[in-house]
Image (tube, grey):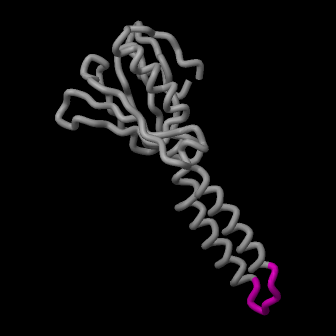
Amino acid sequence: MAINPKYLNPGEQVVWSTRTHVKALVMPVLVLLVTVGFAGYLSSLPDDNKPTWFGIIWGVTILVNIIWGLIPFLNWFGSTYTVTDRRLTTHKGVLTRSGHDIPLTRISDVSYQKGVLDRILGCGTLIVSDASEQGRVELPDVPNVEKRQLALSDLLFHGSKADDGS
């Protein structure tokens, strides 16, 4: 389960809970592979000032991997979407956490969008329309978005608490 049970009210049951699709980690992994490979290549070149260049090369590599590798991973790991029998809740952040709840009684429509890459990878954007001033909340990169949308629609319009099998 992607949500911490301490965020649930007494008697509240999770219908589904997930993180964003793992595709969010493709770029951080590519950055890691390219920078470490490039740094390794540069470190192997002969040079009279090798200790100085070695420190600079690997210092920049570590900094780049923290900014474009570790931080996106921590953001992915710390972000969850959860539907319970009472509400839709999102939590995100590592050092500073934030959350957003929409009671199911306020949700008026649930839909999804999928681009070509999303169709290949089996994810998409879940769009929830509610009666608030915001009017619409988009949850990007939801895995198995069709199943999640059907489970949420079934819960909203038929009161079923059946899990979507994920």
Q: Nearer the viewer, residue 10 or 140?
A: 140
Horizontal placement of 129 versus 126: left or right? left
Residue 75 percent coordinates (x, y): 49, 46
Task: Say if the magenta span includes residue 29.
Answer: no
Quarter in which the C terminus is drawn? top right
Taking depth in this image into account, of 14 and 140 the one nearest to the observer is: 140
**Residue 117 locus on image (x, y percent):** 55, 49
- Does residue 75 appear to the left or right of 99 in the view shown? right
Check the image and report above or below for 52 versus 140: below
Residue 90, quarter of picture: top left
The residue at 22%/35% (across/down) is 135
* Residue 97 in the image, given as x and y percentages of width and height: 39, 39
- In the picture, the quarter occupied by the N terminus is top right
Residue visible at 35% across and 20% down?
Answer: 87
Q: Position of residue 19 (x, y in %)?
A: 52, 35
Does 47 appear in magenta?
yes
From the viewer's perspective, tell me whether residue 110 is left or right of residue 29. left
Segment tinted magenta in the rendering: 44-50
Of residues 21 and 145, the one drawn nearer to the viewer in this rendering: 145
Q: Is residue 123 above or below residue 15?
A: below
In the rendered image of this protein, does residue 117 appear above or below residue 10? Answer: below
